[in-house]
């Protein structure tokens, strides 16, 4: 079944983020207080490895399993949406101690009150969709 | 992330929220949600996997050790009146049902979730899409977004959390 590989990626992602404590509210709080290198180490090593991998993909013109050339869509240009949207996201991230990935993972660890956060996040996404054309980008 | 790129997809968790909106029929209200969500099903499978992964990691791979937070962090949180700091992944002061079912507790979760959902789509990505994939691909917009994440995060942690707790 072709969806199985995505399921395994998700499981792997979930386990890594729990074991590295990146899904912990406390670790996010500590990060924003600059009191530990922990989160910076995780994000930094992911980005470091990511840069090397993506540059190699581009140099070697690697193909995906389906045989298509690998293409990462560049992010749209702009400043306002990234600063404003980013800051709104950051407020929520530091308050909930969880960004979208960890929300699901934490639900799996048995924190069912996370369903409220996920529902509110879906509502937030929906609201953005409604207001999109009225917001500066 | 590499595995997903290799499979021909872009790594980012927050897109699943948009997909869930579309499935719920949000296309009736905005073009933004009018896309072929069936093509995005892989996204939800990753979500399902993440939930299973979280379940596995806590139930079969955890020794129940306390998170080794820095001593400054622990004392800052004690000042907030937090207890059992680091014994679970999330503070009971925010996530236990006792607290969630109060007006304050419920507002915290709803506001936090709403900001994450709204902000992530406005900024076009979250931690995984911008900080990890975007920065790895040397995207300037992602760097700006990460700076935005920190502006919001620092304001919350240093100014708003002390007002709440």
Image (cartoon, coloured by chain):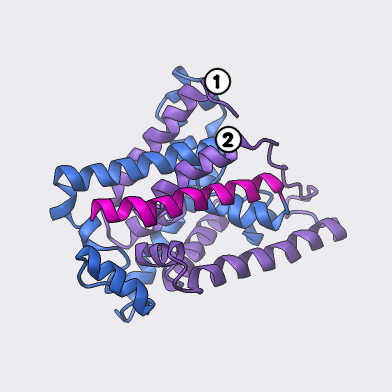
Chain colours: A purple, B blue
The answer to if A37 sits in the magenta stretch is no
**Residue marked by disc 1:** A133
Q: Chain of mark 1?
A: A
Judge whether residue B154 is colored magenta.
yes
First-in-chain label (1 vs 2)? 2
The boundaries of the magenta stretch are B139-165
Secondary structure of residue under mark 1: helix
Q: Quadrant of the C terminus of chain A?
A: top right
Q: Residue at x 20, y 48 (%)?
A: B105
Q: Can residue B149 be seen by looking at this rendering?
A: yes
Depth check, front residue: B60 or B112: B112
Relative height, residue B40 to residue B26 (above, below)? below
Give the residue drawn at x 52%, y 61%. Answer: A8
Q: Secondary structure at mark 2?
A: helix
Judge whether residue B59 can be spotted in this image: no
- Residue A121: x and y, percent? 38, 40
Q: Quadrant of residue A64?
A: bottom right
Of circles 1 and 2, the one toward us is: 2
For residue B24, above or below residue B63: above
Tell me what residue is drawn at x 46 percent, y 72 percent.
A20
Q: List the residue tagged with mark 2.
A: A81
Q: Position of residue A86 (x, y in %)?
A: 52, 44
For the point 52% across and 39% down, the residue is A85
What's the CA distance linking mark 1 and mark 2? 12 Å
Which chain hosts label 2? A
Q: Mark 1 packing: few (<14 Cα in 10 Å), some, or many (20+)?
A: few
What numbered label is drawn on residue B103? none
Going by the picture, which residue comes out furthest to the top? Answer: B28
Residue A132, image x, y percentages: 52, 25
Q: Quadrant of residue A109?
A: bottom left
Is A131 located above or below residue A93 in the figure?
Answer: above
């Amino acid at each position: 079944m072709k969806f199985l590989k995505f399921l395994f990626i998700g499981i792997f992602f979930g386990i890594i983020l729990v074991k590295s404590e990146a899904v912990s509210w406390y670790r996010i709080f500590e990060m924003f207080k600059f009191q530990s290198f922990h989160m910076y180490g995780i994000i930094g090593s992911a980005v470091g490895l990511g840069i090397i991998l993506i540059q190699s993909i581009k140099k070697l013109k690697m193909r995906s399993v389906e045989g298509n050339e690998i293409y990462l869509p560049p992010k749209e240009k702009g400043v306002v949406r990234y600063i404003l949207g980013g800051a709104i996201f950051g407020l929520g991230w530091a308050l909930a101690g969880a960004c979208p990935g960890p929300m699901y993972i934490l639900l799996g660890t048995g924190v069912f009150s996370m369903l409220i956060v996920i529902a509110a996040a879906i509502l937030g996404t929906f609201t953005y969709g409604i207001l999109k054309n009225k917001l500066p980008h | 992330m590499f595995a997903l790129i290799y499979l021909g997809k872009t790594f980012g968790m927050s897109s699943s929220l948009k997909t869930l909106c579309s499935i719920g029929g949000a296309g009736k209200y905005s073009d933004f949600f009018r896309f072929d969500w069936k093509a995005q099903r892989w996204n939800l499978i990753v979500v399902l996997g993440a939930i299973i992964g979280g379940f596995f990691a806590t139930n079969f791979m955890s020794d129940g050790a306390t998170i080794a937070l820095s001593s400054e962090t622990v004392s800052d949180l004690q000042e907030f009146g937090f207890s059992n700091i680091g014994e679970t992944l999330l503070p009971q002061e925010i996530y236990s049902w006792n607290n969630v079912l109060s007006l304050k507790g419920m507002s915290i979760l709803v506001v936090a979730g709403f900001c994450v959902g709204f902000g992530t789509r406005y900024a076009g990505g979250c931690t995984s899409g911008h900080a990890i994939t975007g920065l790895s691909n040397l995207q300037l917009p992602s760097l700006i977004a990460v700076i935005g994440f920190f502006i919001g995060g620092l304001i919350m942690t240093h100014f708003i959390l002390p007002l709440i707790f």
